[in-house]
Image (cartoon, rainbow, N blue to C red):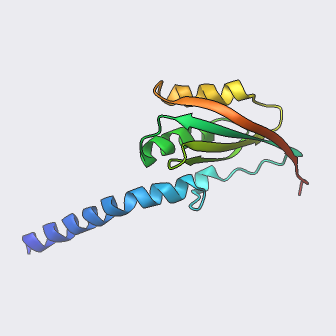
Amino acid sequence: MQGSKRTLITLLISISLTASPELISLHNQGKIISSTNSKEILVREIETFVVEINGISCEGCANRIKAQFDSKPFVIDSKVYFKNQSAIVSVKSGTYNSNDIETWVKMVDFKYGAKVIQQYIKTVEEE
């Protein structure tokens, strides 16, 4: 009986570890949204930064950078892409500049090099 419990626990841990890179990838792409990330911010203008990030070597790195973006006030949404080493960060317009975004990436780890390659403002209607 003891052996079958260990086998079951080992099997569950193995399945969890096997699925974790895919789950992290889906979370980074915004396809899985946790309830703590949902922010109800009513804004008239959203400023979006497209960032090139050098040095991302795994989905875990991308997830750490995304967590850094999401921890900042006035960040509405962020997506970090491991495969093409880039990010898209949307913020309340006028709250941050490209230097802020690049600095946040460096704050995660100095091995990352970030450069904002595009920046635009989109007007949205408040509900």
Name the spot of residue 126 as percent of width and height, x first: 90, 53
Indicate the quadrant where residue 52 lies. Answer: top right
In the rendered view, would you say 31 is above or below 46? below
Q: Work out which quarter of the rendered image holds the N terminus and state it.
A: bottom left
Name the spot of residue 28 as percent of width and height, x first: 55, 52
User: Which residue sits at x=70%, y=50%?
Assistant: 39
User: Which residue sits at x=68%, y=26%?
Assistant: 100
User: Which residue sits at x=45%, y=27%?
Assistant: 111
> In the image, 65: left or right of 7?
right
> In the image, 60: left or right of 40?
left
Q: Nearer the viewer, residue 42 or 16?
A: 16
Count of numbered circles in the view:
0
In the rendered view, would you say 85 is above or below 17? above
Name the spot of residue 78 as percent of width and height, x first: 64, 46
Q: Work out which quarter of the rendered image holds the C terminus and state it.
A: bottom right
Name the spot of residue 108 as percent of width and height, x first: 50, 30
User: Which residue sits at x=49%, y=56%?
Assistant: 25
In the rendered view, would you say 13 is above or below 56? below
